[in-house]
Image (spheres, rainbow, N blue to C red):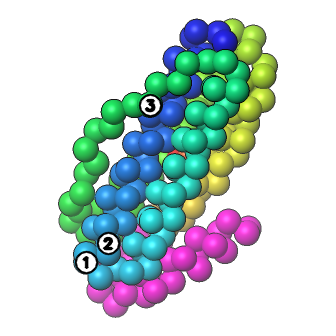
């Protein structure tokens, strides 16, 4: 396996793992605050990121590359409220998108069309997740500091996210 691409895929394994851990911390924060809907949402986002990580690990191994299972940074686990929580969610997704674009760019530089092809799944996934994070943050910005709005957001978040995915 091309060593530049192998290193980039190992970095990507870390970013997906870090996102999974971050969303787990977000789920736990929301759980403790009584936002059950938001908590379920982040538990499931955390699971999804773990799948993204495993998919990369399996791919690198199948291609005969050397997988490095990374050490992770401690995730942020306190938030001022839902607005900050979802700002961080969008930031995290935008960061991952940027990294994936970088992998894609390097695949083309290195003429590694096989990995380029494999990474298309991540491009589509990121597009979807970033759009969803933006939609949720937009809704929270409309709600502002209104407590009953936060109550309804928490109640409806999984429906909003599901409908968003089906659009
Ligand atoms: Fe891994 O999909 Fe978002 O970050």
Which residue does the image show at 46% across and 25% down from the upper left?
A: 68
Q: Which residue is mark 2?
A: 30
Q: Is residue 154 above or below residue 100?
A: below
Cβ–Cβ under 8 Å for marks 1 and 3: no
Residue 73 image offset from top left, x and y in percent: 28, 38
Q: Nearer the viewer, residue 119 or 154?
A: 119
Q: Is residue 151 magenta?
A: yes
Q: Quadrant of residue 31?
A: bottom left
The local secondary structure at tag 1 comes to helix
Q: CA distance from mark 3 to mark 2?
A: 28 Å
Q: Where residue 80 sits: x, y (%)?
A: 21, 65
- Tell me the residue that label 3 is attached to: 69
Q: Mark 3, residues whose alpha carbon is within 10 Å: few (<14), some, or many (≥20)?
A: few
Residue hosting label 1 = 33
Q: Quadrant of residue 152?
A: bottom left
Q: Residue at x 75, y 11 (%)?
A: 111
Residue 72 lies, in percent from the top left, at 33, 37
CB under 8 Å between discs 1 and 2? yes
Q: Which residues are magenta?
A: 139-167
Q: Is residue 43 left or right of residue 65?
A: left
Q: Is mark 1 within 8 Å of ligand 1?
A: no
Question: Between marks 1 and 3, how big is the CA–CA gap?
Answer: 32 Å
């Amino acid at each position: 396996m091309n060593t530049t691409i192998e290193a980039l895929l190992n970095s990507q394994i870390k970013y997906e793992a870090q996102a999974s851990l971050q969303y787990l911390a977000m789920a736990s924060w929301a759980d403790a605050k009584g936002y059950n809907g938001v908590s379920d949402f982040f538990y499931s986002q955390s699971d999804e990121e773990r799948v993204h990580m495993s998919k990369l690990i399996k791919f690198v191994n199948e291609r005969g590359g050397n997988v490095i299972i990374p050490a992770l940074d401690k995730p942020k686990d306190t938030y001022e409220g839902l607005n900050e929580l979802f700002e961080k969610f969008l930031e995290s997704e935008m960061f991952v998108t940027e990294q994936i674009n970088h992998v894609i760019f390097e695949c083309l530089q290195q003429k590694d069309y096989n990995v380029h092809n494999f990474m298309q799944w991540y491009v589509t996934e990121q597009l979807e997740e970033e759009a969803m994070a933006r939609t949720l943050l937009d809704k929270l910005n409309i709600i502002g500091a209104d407590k009953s709005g936060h109550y309804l957001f928490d109640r409806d978040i999984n429906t909003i996210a599901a409908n968003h995915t089906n659009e």
